[in-house]
Image (spheres, rainbow, N blue to C red):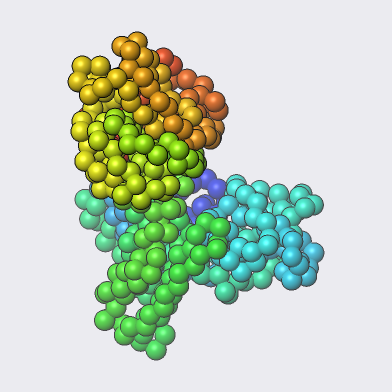
Amino acid sequence: MSKIIRIGTRDSELALWQAKIVQSQLEHLGHKTELVPVKATGDIVLDKPLYELGITGIFTRTLDIAMLNNDIDIAVHSLKDVPTVLPKGIVQAAVIKRGNVNDTLVFKHNEEFLSAKEAVIATGSLRRKAQWLNRFPTHTITDLRGNINSRLQKLQDNEHWNGAIFAAAGIGRIGIRPEEAVNLDWMIPAPAQGAIMITALEDDEETRAICKELNHEETEICTTIEREFLNKLEGGCTAPIGALAYIKNEEINFKGVLLSTDGSKRIDVTRVKKLGEHDDIAAFCADFVIERGGKRLMDNIKHSQRKINVYSTKSFTESQRLLFQEKVIADSSDFVKISLNRIHPRFLKDEIKNVVITSKNAVESLVTNYSAVELQFKNIYCVGRRTKRLVEQKIGKVTHTEKNAKTLANYLVEYLEGTEVTYFCSDLRLDDLPNILKENHIKVNEIEAYRTKLDGVEVGDTIEGVMFYSPSTVQSYLKKNNTKKVIAFCIGETTATEARKYFKDVRVAKVPAVESVIELVNEHYVSY
């Protein structure tokens, strides 16, 4: 090859060491090379946005862009830092023979702290943190970032830290492995840890052919399995995943692990296959983990890494939570707590001609106190389809129902048989219905069937929308939160009327049901 091969690399000491290894091997084969340290991407212009090209890796992005702009011919990476899906137009050209795969503990004085209840270990890796806490659950993990030299210096400077975890290959390659360092054989490494990868442009066949001469087949086979396992589990989410494959006696030996971020949950998998019959090993092991709780674990990790943008003032069921579309990260709790009252028998000693029920809570209170036989009412008037359904299931036929209390009151003024109603209600209730009836000379006997406690919580600054299900949930929310620019998603017009007193943007569900409010939220985020 007559042209000079431009080798792109980050400018850290370890990255330059790795690039020089590749440079040395290429020059040994008779090729001319040039190292091109690449530092920043701010002044590089591309024809397409980064997301369209699939450029994602925080440690590889700069070199990917430089390559797509034809500023370099190849790039040298620590393979464990490379996303499992490469950007469009860039391919893996070679993998250099692997170094030490282990994680290494560097400690300051001695190893006695390992048996102590309390100790502080520094690492910026979720995987190392989770595995350490799984083994030493009472220890504390503190964050540690920066290049290898700066991380070692931080360890020495901090008197409260007992040790820090590094990749053995990294501290070994640049010759700064301290004497007080031990390999953690029990810790499953990151997929492809210890391996160096070369990437090139897919259409640069000449450069790719040269790089292929540097490829170490055994390392390529093992790291491909590990990265495929990672890819099938990961789903675009950073999670504590370890994987290691190695070849012994013409067999592929594989072990993988997925943990919760705090190390309290752990799912392991191992498998051995003959070399040449190993194509399904990564898929099999990933499916094994997923089927044994891995999917739920990954879903929990994904949601914990994304900011909550919608809050519900009523707790969701699991089936309701699954109805939200991908852009919605919802949390929920009950902002209104209900306690049912004892309804004294004297209220029911005489036949009640006209009963008004405006909530399911009143129904529950009645049927908790008395049997259906004892609840003989001539006419039952209620609010809401679900309340009507519950009344007819547990008490008796409903004479008439309306969407809200105000419209029901207007109906009763027009069509009520007689001039008196018994209203089973809460200690907190809207005044519309009793006021309208009293103004029209209808006597209202109010019986407190249940008590309502406003028990809201303070929601985070990331909340863009709040889901309300009654005027009480609006009031409960306001006790702990201000009316900053959030959208009020309301279950019905009565709730929306209350919300409009405090919120500028109020949306009303088509049907008075939680699922309909969820649909309202989804519609907003589809068009958002």
Is residue 198 shown to the viewer in this render? Answer: no
Q: Position of residue 125 (x, y in %)?
A: 55, 55
Residue 379, picture quadrant: top left
Q: Is residue 490 shown left or right of residue 331?
A: left
Q: Nearer the viewer, residue 138 or 101?
A: 138
Q: How many marks?
A: 0
Q: Position of residue 483 (x, y in %)?
A: 47, 20
Q: Is residue 95 above or below residue 440?
A: below
Residue 107, picture quadrant: bottom right
Q: Nearer the viewer, residue 220 or 210?
A: 220
Q: Is residue 316 shown left or right of residue 427?
A: left
Q: Position of residue 110 (x, y in %)?
A: 78, 68
Quadrant containing the N terminus is: bottom left
- Give the residue drawn at x 64%, y 55%: 141
Is residue 349 shown to the viewer in this render? Answer: yes
Q: Nearer the viewer, residue 514 or 394?
A: 394
Q: Is residue 352 shown left or right of residue 309?
A: left
- Give the residue drawn at x 43%, y 53%: 300
Quadrant containing the C terminus is: top left
- Give the residue drawn at x 32%, y 61%: 232
Q: Position of residue 445 (x, y in %)?
A: 40, 26
Q: Is residue 514 above or below residue 146?
A: above
Q: Which residue sits furthest front?
A: 350
Q: Nearer the viewer, residue 79 or 316?
A: 316
- Give the residue drawn at x 35%, y 50%: 371
Q: Which residue sits furthest bottom?
A: 249
